[in-house]
Amino acid sequence: MFNILKNTKNSEQTKKAKIIALLNQKGGVGKTTMAYNVAHALKEQGKKVLCIDMDPQYNFSSLFGFTPNEDSFCIHQLLVNSVKELRPMHVGALLSEVMLETEKGIDLIPASQDLSGFELTVAGINSPRQLILKKFIEKNALDERYDYIVIDGPPTLGLLVVNILCACDGVLFPFIPDAFSEQGLKNIQNVLEDIEDMGIIKTPKVLGYIPNLFETRRKQARNDFDDIQSHFSDAHVFTPFNNKAHFAKSMANKKSVFDYTAKDYKELQSQFLHMTEHIESQLN
């Protein structure tokens, strides 16, 4: 299913990739589903796309058909190898062997459960722990080899999320319109403010909020959606993704909405293409 990629660099390419992340502190909001389809929408528009799975649950990797085993090297080992102070912990994991080309022509750096130990592993280093992912991307010139890098983050507010926010240019926030998601979004906003206060990197741009699994017939869902819109009135809120069976079907089959030609998927395809056009307009 996968081809191992050679670690090559296009010397003629000077334009830096736009790095976007999909985050929410609350799980079960469709964050990985959105990341997967955004990546495919970008690919549909002719962009060269790299996906990085930064969630120890590795659902993003699984959607691409990758399941780690005890011998697998993933993003965790690559990040550890990129830190000189952790040399005694370095392993024989090469980027060219870890990075995979998927059937859809989207490259993938997968994750595994090993990533759950990232924070403890780097706890004692002196170099900036929040910049490990950013430096890894730059050191390997990944930002020079792609048009877009799409990162799926974990449903936490720990060091992994801080690394993602410090590495990316923009963030998308999928959410289910309810009080719990609203609080999770507020918590991530606080982390963004903390990063801005650090003053060591440019704070990523909030690209918008993605209402997902929206129950149009539930009055409470509409009320919660209105409340969230009013709280984040300065940000772009995308057209809600309704809770429809065919969307769930595509994920169950590990396919993007662009793998289907049925009429039911045309609206979803249009929504994701509109989203990528918005992203491009905001980051260019």
Image (spheres, rainbow, N blue to C red):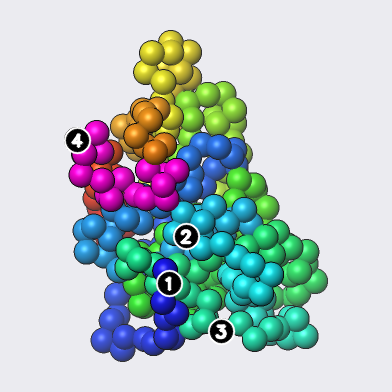
Instruction: Label 4, secondary structure: give it.
Output: helix
Question: Which residue has dot 2 on it?
Answer: 65
Q: Which mark is residue 263?
A: 4
Q: Position of residue 71 (x, y in %)?
A: 66, 74
Q: Does the magenta-highlighted stretch encompass residue 254?
A: yes
Q: Badges 1 and 4: C-beta atoms under 8 Å apart? A: no
Q: Position of residue 152 (x, y in %)?
A: 50, 54
Question: Which residue has dot 3 on it?
Answer: 94
What amino acid is labelled 1 in the image?
Phe
Image position of 140 (left or right of 188): left
In this rendered view, identify the residue nearer to me: 10 or 170: 10
Q: Which numbered disc, 2 or 1, marks the residue that appears first in the sequence?
A: 1
Q: Badges 2 and 4: C-beta atoms under 8 Å apart? A: no
Write down the region rendered in magenta: 250-265
Q: Position of residue 42 (x, y in %)?
A: 29, 57
Q: Which numbered disc, 1 or 3, marks the residue that appears first in the sequence?
A: 1
Q: Does the magenta-highlighted stretch encompass residue 183?
A: no
Quadrant holding the N terminus: bottom left
Q: Which numbered disc, 2 or 4, marks the residue that appears first in the sequence?
A: 2
What amino acid is labelled 4 in the image?
Lys
Q: Which mark is residue 2?
A: 1
User: Of tags 4 and 3, which is closer to the observer?
Assistant: 4
Distance in Å between CA atoms under marks 1 and 4: 30 Å
Quadrant holding the C terminus: bottom left
